[in-house]
Amino acid sequence: MNSVSGFRYLTDQLMKVQVVNEVNKDFVIEALRSIAELITYGDQHDASFFEFFMEKQVMGEFVRVLRISKTVIISLQLLQTVSIMIQNLKSEHSIYYMFSNEYINYLITYKFDFRNEELVSYYISFLRAISGKLNKNTISLLIKTQNDEVVAFPLYEEAIRFAFHEESMVRTAVRSLTLNVYHVGDESVNTYVASRPRADYFVKLIEFFRDQCISLNELVGNTTNNKSSEATSKILSAVDDIEDNLYYFSDVISAGIPDVGRLITDNLLKLLIFPYLLPSLRMEVIYEMRFDAVASLYVLCCILRIVKIKDLANTVAAALFCHIEAFIPSSEARLNGCTCGICFTQESQEASNGVDALQTDSGSSQNSTACLQKTIKVSLLDHKESCLALRDALLSYIAVGDDVQVMGSINVMATLLQAKELDESMLDALGILPERKKHKKLLLQALVGEGSGEEQLFSEEGNVIKEGCGDELTSYIDRLKNQYGVSCSCPEVAESPRIHKNQVFDALVSLFCRSDISAETLWDGGWLLRQLLPYRETEFNNNHLNLLKDSYMKCNSRLIEEFRGSWPDLLITVLCDEWRKCKRAIEASSPRKELKCILLPQHKLLAEDQSDSSLAAGERMRELVKVFVLFHQLRIFSVGRPLPDQPPINPPIDFPEKCRAKIAGVDNIGPKPSTELSLADAVPCKIAFERGKERHFFFLAISLGSSGWVVLAEELSSKVRRGVVRIIAPLAGCNPKIDDKHSRWLHLRIRPTTFPLRDAVNFTAQAKTKSRPLVDGRWTLAFRDESSCKFAQSMVVEELNLQSKEVERRLGPLLDFERAVNYLNSSDLEPSSPRIPVNSL
């Protein structure tokens, strides 16, 4: 049948059809399908097929068949046939013919019965296939012009009717089609799509996106008391939809149609950012339609990260200097203005600058630190008589907000800091211009002969920018008033950028003084501080240094307590691991975590568990280590020293020959099941792992460096005082206790060998999976007499003490900060000896 004669026969038979009914519909369907195959074959192998197709005007026959058909199935097959032909035709001549003679436009505008969902899918696929062949030559065949202006474009007009269809596949196909249209680059078509009423598409697009954001806000609010996997999945699904929309906006903007970019910018600001997102950045609910602050911060970050429009980024940055009340309708706002939060004013900065005198008069470093912390808190008092600027609201969340509010605010700051669309003078006005960028700018100014740049670069005051706000900020504040009706009367606009940066420092240092924030969030704060940290120690205020030192010392004391906790055997391993992670995190170019962490802070759950289980204790220990590592590294930065790749700790040492493990014959790796050992110090006992089934063992507690084990061994009948290891458990955390009523019984808690590590960076996959939690075991050992039981207990305590002392010895250099700093470029650590493997994570 793959011949022109066969094609001729099919066409002749199709032309004879005068009405399509139940009798002949199968033939018509098969004829349409076969023609599509023949045209596709001919386009690749024999041009005479398409020549015959043009000669007989088969496209006209398709239209005629559609008119005389009364069944949906013919419409479906016809749309599929034409779609296949268009998709597979390679010849430009063939495509040009297909799009001419108005046949395609007739099919596009035909009144199909779209109550049939299957027909909608076929029709949209047909439109998408056409859009895939658009270029500057073919698009002219599908538009209608008058006086060199486009007056009709059926393909685009009909497609956007389905832009907000309930079926996501249809919406995706329409968006793909519109992008194909925008990226053709035809100026007349661009003018057409950006003019009314086609421009209403972009307004509806932003309204659709706004509704998705409102739905996300409701889901986040409902999840506060419902942390089920189903609720999490709904949020993640909503997040995916929101991000998909924003990437579509970004793709539209990349087509380079100026009017469309302005439409998206204006409508994002007017329909979502100004009325919904910005008013929610306060701690009191005063606006009934307001978003939750967490959802607001997330959506704002997403918009700024994905939709890269200079006017949008700079307008949002300028809006941060406006009072929150400026974005709330007057009928909704309170007459007495802002009633909450923190207002960072010039007075607070002056109070902060007066701290040096306070230090010299202090009687002790502890009292001095308390006074310094109180001084910074003065700048965080309520200012009920004045309104709160949005920038101050973000700083207030960092200073006194909860974990997710802190995380969200830091992410907004990080997003602004990394936005290439944002002018550096705008970053400087916000107080988040990195010192390296400022130094580079001043250096360039000095090189090109600008006197102010050279003067500031080499000034003793440390590159203080003498001017107030830049022209860029002023112009966007004027645009807020003239174009959007938002008036900015905040006095902070006229302040020096140095004051603004010190306010950011105040908020971050206040954050580091808190104990109710997760380590992962503190790491985000550390990243931001590292970005802003000046080159010279003298520029970092003494009050900040003292507060960081105070927080570090408190964390240091808590870490020492872990030497006798449940996980000393893993403490060094965890610390070295977290040291590397923290170094990568705060030296990275951007915060390492997914933005979704703002909505789903799953990493805090185990750390908040205050139970006495060893897993909860292990997670608390890891959280503590992460905080300690951050504070230690920040202090190293603050004194201008580079971070080492590894923490300064002592290496392991050789074990004494008289230690219990050596006497038992255990090698440096530790005891292994089925290995032989000496029972010289072992104590016989009984234990039942199943009801009614007691087993006889010899009990032994041993330690090697920072590792330790409790061992149950079976005595060898062929060898005196020799046995075979049968059961091994961690020594740490066993908490030996003699039973109150039975003096021969010793109770031990047996914790897991390790604990599951949760990675907050890749929390999305973890949130969707369920894992069976590990639990502590309980051993009750029965000894021959009371003295044997007490000996076993003392043996466990003795080995625990040896284990904790070894951990303390190895971490000694790290816990003494001055000594640790001196060790960074020296070899004063204890002499190295063969490294002993420790339990791996």
Image (tube, helix red, strand yellow):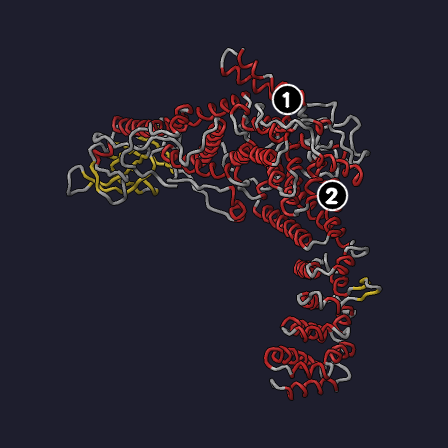
Q: Tell me which residue sits at (41%, 29%) in the image.
A: 562
Is residue 365 found left or right of 751 in the rendered image? right
Q: Which residue is mark 1?
A: 349
- Relative to residue 263, is residue 352 depicted above or below? above
Q: For the C terminus, give its image quadrant.
A: top left
Whole-percent x, y for residue 197 in the image: 81, 56
Whole-percent x, y for residue 513 in the image: 54, 25
Judged from the image, the secondary structure of the residue bearing numbered disc 1 is helix
Instruction: Pick whichever, 756 or 642, lies toward us.
Output: 642
Q: Which residue is mark 2?
A: 269
Please give the label number shown on residue 282. none
Q: Tell me which residue sits at (47%, 23%) in the image.
A: 554
- Relative to residue 247, is residue 778 depicted above or below? above
Q: For the N terminus, give its image quadrant.
A: bottom right
Give the residue type at disc 1. Gln
Residue farthest to the front, as pictured = 449
